[in-house]
Amino acid sequence: MMILLQSTIKIELNAAKGLEHTKDFPLYTEAIKFFNHPESMVRIAVRTLTLNVYRVQDASMLRFIRDRTAAPYFSNLVWFIGKHILELDACVRNDADHQSQQKLDDLVAEHLDHLHYINDILCLNIPDLNDVLTEHLLHKLLIPLYIYSLTSEPTKRPVTSSPYNRDHIQSIEVITRNLEAILKGKNTETPTRMNYPIQRIESEEETKPSVSCVVALFLLSQVFLIITHGPIVHALAWIILQSDLSVFEEGATKILEMYLSKAKTNVKLEFSKPQLSLEKALETSGQERDYTTPEYSGAKAFGYDTDHSSCDLDPELVSTSLPSTSHISETSSIANDSTEDLVTQIHSIKSIVAAQNMPDSPLPDSGIDSSSSKTLSDLNNITDEEKQKLLSVLPSTSAEKNMSIENILDKESKEIDKRPFLKTVLESLDCSENDYKALFALCLLFALINNKGVNTELLDTLLCPEEDTTSRNSTTSIQEGTDVASGQRDTPVRSKRPLQSFNAFLINKLMAIANLSCKPASKVRLVTCELSVCLLRVALQGTRGVPSPQHIAAAESLRARAAALARNFYKCDDIFLDMFEDEYCEMSKRPLNVEWLCMDAAILLPPTRTPMSGIAFAKRLPSGEMERARRAIRTFFLIRDLHLKLTERADTQLPLANPGHFVQIQGDKEDPRCLQLTVHKPRVGAGAPPRTVLLRAKFKFDDHIRSMAAKQRLTKGRTKARQKKMQQIGRLLEVSGISAPAFATRHRPLFTRPGLSAVRRSSGGDGEECERRLRRPSGHVLKDGIVVYRERTSRESSISRSSSTQGSREGSPRPRSEDIPLEDIRRNMAAAATPVTTQSQPSTSREALKVVTTSSEETSFISGEVPRYKRKGIVETI
Amino acid sequence: MAYAYLFKYIIIGDTGVGKSCLLLQFTDKRFQPVHDLTIGVEFGARMITIDGKQIKLQIWDTAGQEAFRSITRSYYRGAAGALLVYDITRRDTFNHLTTWLEDARQHSNSNMVIMLIGNKSDLESRREVKKEEGEAFAREHGLVFMETSAKTAANVEEAFINTAKEIYEKIQEGVFDINNEANGIKIGPQHSTGGGASGAGGAGAGAAGGGCC
């Protein structure tokens, strides 16, 4: 095989182009036969080659590719992607105990490869190819397998037994059929086939392939994160958001019209095996130039383990005819004339819907439209009045507004029943049991909202509050004119009627997740919390960019709840403070990246608690008290951040200290009067790379006593700074007993004059040690070598011990640097002197250096508070 | 064709640095001064012995993969070792190393062994990149470094074999999951060292048949 591949592939492009009159292009056709080769490098080579061939954009070659190979190649490609995800699904289903994570990783990576490959093709912008590819993807994979799988739960079915409950099948199959009919359009050649799907569906009930809802959500998230080709993502988004039992036909037509007008639509909407293997198809297409054979009749239903065709050939697949996808259909207007079958179906669905949800609306045809717009305008009247009130009245007292919101919510939750796919997505957000599914639903919503290919008007379904939709209507219809993607919606009916909004429903669900996160025994992982908070912000800001007062109030109470949660862990100890700062640092340094999140196969397995799983902390549940504290702190940060952003307030309280430069001071082994000062760039996160040294300098004091005095001063400053920080945290978390800021801002100078420090110093090391212990509020005296939860701490402390001079009592093994309130020092210094950072010109002030140093102390100076050293002695810049 | 392990290598670097020539020199022990631009993929294989074990090196030289994200992704993912090649007579190929390395690090599995190769060391008179610079770059990024000449075959063997040794060591340390083929390492069909004949090129059919995806 490879020999063949090698020889083929070496043919140069030009040579191949020379063969163009023979209507063959062996380099390409031979290569694509290996697209599913078991050797990954061969698959990669095939992909590389095809992409490079497409990129040449040679007209005759592209024509050849489109006419002869596009349909067979893409249909096979799509088929194998589908098989692949069924394998992935099986892997997820059968592995609850995280055993085959490695295999899952591969399968997920492979799926991503496929999507990237497809996206790379689509991004080459070759219209003919894109049409064929889009059609295959939508008809054969994305809709029948990915989207339909959204509905196959909650009836969790074993792989083999009959999957659906009766009602469920009914609605889904009806949708399938209808959508299919639409996709087929009104091609005159098809009416005889209208009855056909119904029979087939009966027999297929049990074998119809689908993946679990979790996997479907995950895969769709990936699709929306990677693919931006408008016709695909917009169609998918439309189907997810809008497909409604009643307006399904009309809507789907509208959406799909655009590309249907170009591509032949005579394709069955299902995930089925291409009836010819790629090789066969290529052979046949070589002989038969124009193949407009109508759709095959013997579509093979796909069963899980039916075949393990190792490569591209499938012996079973020698069937009668070819896919007819490359035929260019002229029948572009499919919308308006239905066949009788279709009409009856529509009517029956509508009456079902009416019976269930809208008993008062009589509805043939446009009945639903008018009734829903009526309710809408009713609501709108209420809210207009209420809006006025809301501006003056406190949101919590506005009971009437509450009513109207509840009304909207009520209405939306009724409406949602008519949107099978959206319903599944939104109901997956329920975290009461766990957040397994919710995370994927959030990913999908996030990806959907952020996809450039999705029409913004469509997203209003989620993002635009109900009361806005009608008022915005006039403006949207103007925008529509310019919007290419919505160009097909210019029928008067369309632009008048706003899309049903599910904004309130979505907000409600997201709020519930955030709320649950604030419970001590919550089953919501941090990543879920972060993502829901992120979406909540988008959803609350709506299209106006301003959240309603009521929502702000909700966010406020949410913040209070999160603070209460974190308060449980508030302790006056060093570990808590370090954790607090660490978490803040982590959060701000590594904001959520959904694309990376969706590359991680680990999230496909049910949420776990143990760190042994190797899953990152944010993606699992906390284990142990320490992690619970971290989780509570992080949750508080996230929700506080939401509240700040919604109220458009700048963060004035966090971070606790300005992340300035870190200063490390070390005694000199040889000369006790010397102190070495090193300034680093701040560390990034916990797993930090080696720090960059900005400056290294050596201070020489008059004697070692002064040097020790300096050290002592720093130590006290540090303790002070930590106390101040704890108070800041206390205020943030609203801990009772933490009073107004005044306490913290006043700094009592520790030593007012050098003489005192000298006296103290003479009292010897024990005294100092005692004093330091006393100063520490809790029992966590971090002495040398004490177990601190970071490795480097103990290492550093031991270094400090060994390198410390007689002047340094004990290297305080603080893992982090602190702000040292240096104002005191400054105040006590007589005159201004050279700041540390300009030490290239050593100052030679007479006064002895008062600034104190701790041996091996890491210190962060607030940039504005760089100590003004007045000192005598030399500074060497190393 | 029995082998204990199979390692997949990839060769990366700017166009014209001599990737295909290195491959040819290693697998066929010959040099072809005028080489066509690689289209698609070239692939070679050779058997080497490390620590008394037969190890098959399978080296993939794929052209034009850098233009597409999908390809870069999967290309790196499936390899156990990578030769990152620059041309000592062209400064720009050296300057692009950072980009190559970033790509490799981002997409490959973290255990992939990367060896930095300064090729065309026979063209001393036209040298633009000092050996020290290559060494410094390698040190900074934790790579193994070597200057080679595909023309004179200087250091070519060593480059491939040293990389293999490092991978082998990592296997011994248990860093690689050798049961997962996606790492670019495969355990041989059986551990008997019967055949032992070293072969080159076109040997993949057997291996491919044995493998199952």
Image (spheres, coloured by chain):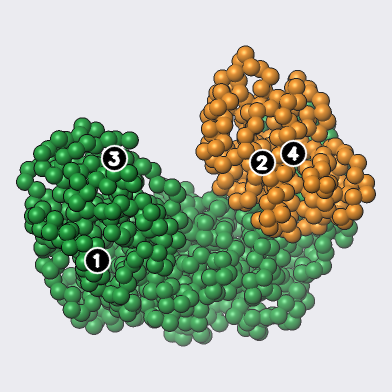
Callout 2 amino acid: Ala
- Disc 2 versus disc 1: distance between alpha carbons? 59 Å
Closer-to-camera residue (A80/A111): A111
Is A622 on the left or on the right of A653, as rendered?
right
Q: Which residue is mark 4?
A: B161
Instruction: Judge if badges 2 and 1 mark residues of a common chain.
Output: no
Label 2: state its secondary structure.
strand
Residue drawn at (56%, 23%) of the image: B130
The crowding category of the residue bearing disc 2, from other C-alpha atoms within 10 Å (few below 14, some 14 to 19, many at least 20), is: many
Residue A639 visible in rendering: no
Q: Colour of chain A?
A: green
Q: Quadrant of residue A557?
A: bottom left
Q: Is residue A814 above or below residue A377?
A: above
The crowding category of the residue bearing disc 1, from other C-alpha atoms within 10 Å (few below 14, some 14 to 19, many at least 20), is: few
- Disc 4 versus disc 3: distance between alpha carbons? 47 Å
Q: Is residue A834 above or below residue A117?
A: above
Residue A231 in picture, x, y percent from top left: 56, 52
The answer to the question of whether label 2 and label 1 lie on touching residues, with beta carbons closer than 8 A, is no
Q: Which residue is mark 1?
A: A766
Callout 1 amino acid: Asp
Rendered orange, the chain in question is B
The numbered mark at residue A697 is 3
User: Furthest residue to the top?
Assistant: B125
The numbered mark at residue B82 is 2
Q: Which callout, 4 or 2, points to the residue nearer the camera? A: 4
